[in-house]
Amino acid sequence: MQKEFIPKLFALLKQGISKETLIKDILSGLIVGIVALPLAIAFAIASGVSPEKGIITAVIAGIVIAAFGGSRVQIGGPTGAFIVIVYGIVQEHGINGLTIATFMAGFIIIAMGIAKLGNYLKFIPYSLIVGFTSGIALIIFSSQINDFLGLGISKIPANFIEKWAVYFQNFSHINWYAIVIALSTVLITLFSQKVLKKIPGSIIAILLSTIVVQLFNIPVDTIESNFGQIPNNINLPSIPHIDFKTVKALIQPAFAIAILGSIESLLSAVVSDSMIGGKHRSNMELIAQGAANIATALFGGIPATGAIARTATNVKNGGRTPISGIVHGLVLLAIMLLFAPYAKLIPMPCLAGILVVVAYHMSEWRQFKSILKGSRMDIIILLTTFFLTVTFDLIIAIEIGIILASFMFMKRMSEAVHVKSISSEITKKEHLFDDELSSLPKEILLYEINGPLFFGAARQFQETITNFNKDYKVVILRMRYVPMIDATGFQSLKEIITTFNSEGVLIILSGIKPDLRASFRNNGIYEIIDRKYIVNNINIAITKAKNYLLK
């Protein structure tokens, strides 16, 4: 088996894990498990599903991702990034539709890992990532206004603009108790770390608000009033019924879950690598992420991925091997089995405050502001992705963003292709590093081509070379710095050769890389040019050109 497809845990167990490292991992896993509890509940509720589904996802995905992933310290589970997608799927297709979409997404992510696409997802532009991440942050913030202000709205529209319209109509129903609890949660979550470094602020806020609400019988919504009891057990796994009609209806959401989950998990792995000086195995990480989503779907959970904030918490608390991630999942399982009946008492404004803090950290407003000072194309991608995410749909935003990013890439690549002409007149005026070009006959025109000949640059390449008026008898195409040629590039090259042949001009190709020569036969180049005029270096090309002129 290739090294990149071996889980990090297996490799580390083979090397041996010291007792000191093991103790640190267990303690870190304990802390991260406690940190993950309120987030798992909050993400589930914000996604439109019951709170236990978030805990189940954190347990199952956390253990699977840690055990089989390609990162030392990745913590898996539900994340804020999925709230928008999950909420939309639940509204349109119900819980069963979400389970099937998650199940399908798992197989898509595994296929991406096997195809080694993990090596390429890192090339998605940062402006696109910041655009939809900031959009998600704004949507998460908006989704919490009802509970944050205690408006008591029973049904909130999914659309961003309609949602705020409903909020404005109900501002007269503000519950000031809810606001105090929510604001207190925000302040405790943000600033308690300055005093109590080892205890998560969200846990402190939950304990304090729950105790105060119960002691003084404060009139605010709780998990129990909105969702009833939280089960303290996990149901047996079951395979969802899937038919072609269902696949057709859910394939787009499944791909959105797969792409978003893959991007976020690899981003988290990269961030953790920089913190511990490690190197993750991206394709194995994708396979583990896919397996985790299949597993969570079987147990009735929601989509999962690598969680950047929880992974960073793991690293900061001493986690250095996947054992900490496994312990984090087991801690959540123990909490669910033992303390789930008490979790129903958590006030909804408290969870809203926690998610507002999550939205703030996700917003990346500093990076957003920085990109707005950058190139025009980056700004277009950023703003387009952001506004599409907020006003329409995250799936559409990702699709359009990737298309725009592809056009940006093609434009920049085409600008990187340079075609420079060299003739005897130029050599008399300019000093050339290539001494062999100093005595170039006037009947010979040399083109130096730098860069890949792909569909984005092929037309410019063809027009530049065929647009000359002088009476040259030989044209040499020096291609030593051409790393690749795609089908469009080969077609343009064939048209150039055919055009010169029809005008009685000899064309010589120089410096073709060996790996490109193999493609010449498949693309029909040998059928229109004599092989003796495809040479290894410029000296041979000029000699052949001079000999041709002597005929």
Image (cartoon, rainbow, N blue to C red):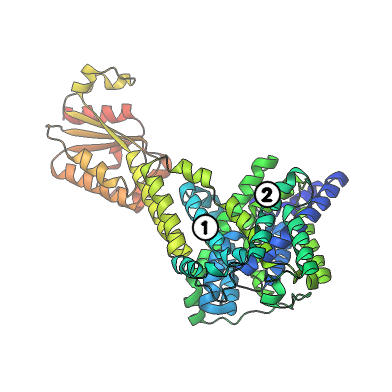
Question: In the rendered structure, which amino acid carries the disc numbered 2?
Answer: Leu
Q: Position of residue 381 (x, y in %)?
A: 41, 51
Q: CA distance from mark 2 to mark 1?
A: 18 Å
* Residue occupying the point 33% across, 40% down: 415
Labels 2, 1: front one: 2
Kindly indicate the quadrant of the structure image that contains residue 111. Answer: bottom right
Q: Position of residue 402 (x, y in %)?
A: 43, 55
Q: Secondary structure at mark 2?
A: helix
Q: Position of 63 compared to 88: left or right? A: right
| Residue 336 in view of the camera | no
Q: Residues within 10 Å of mark 1 (few under 14, many from 20)?
A: many
Q: Position of residue 223 (x, y in %)?
A: 70, 72
- Mark positioned earlier in the residue sequence (2 or 1): 1
Q: Of the numbered discs in the image, which one, if any, rests on residue 138?
A: 1
Question: In the rendered structure, which amino acid carries the disc numbered 1?
Answer: Leu
Front position in the image: 447 or 206? 206
Q: Of the numbered discs in the image, which one, if any, rests on residue 69?
A: none
Q: Residues within 10 Å of mark 2 (few under 14, many from 20)?
A: some
Residue placed under numbered mark 2 in the picture: 190
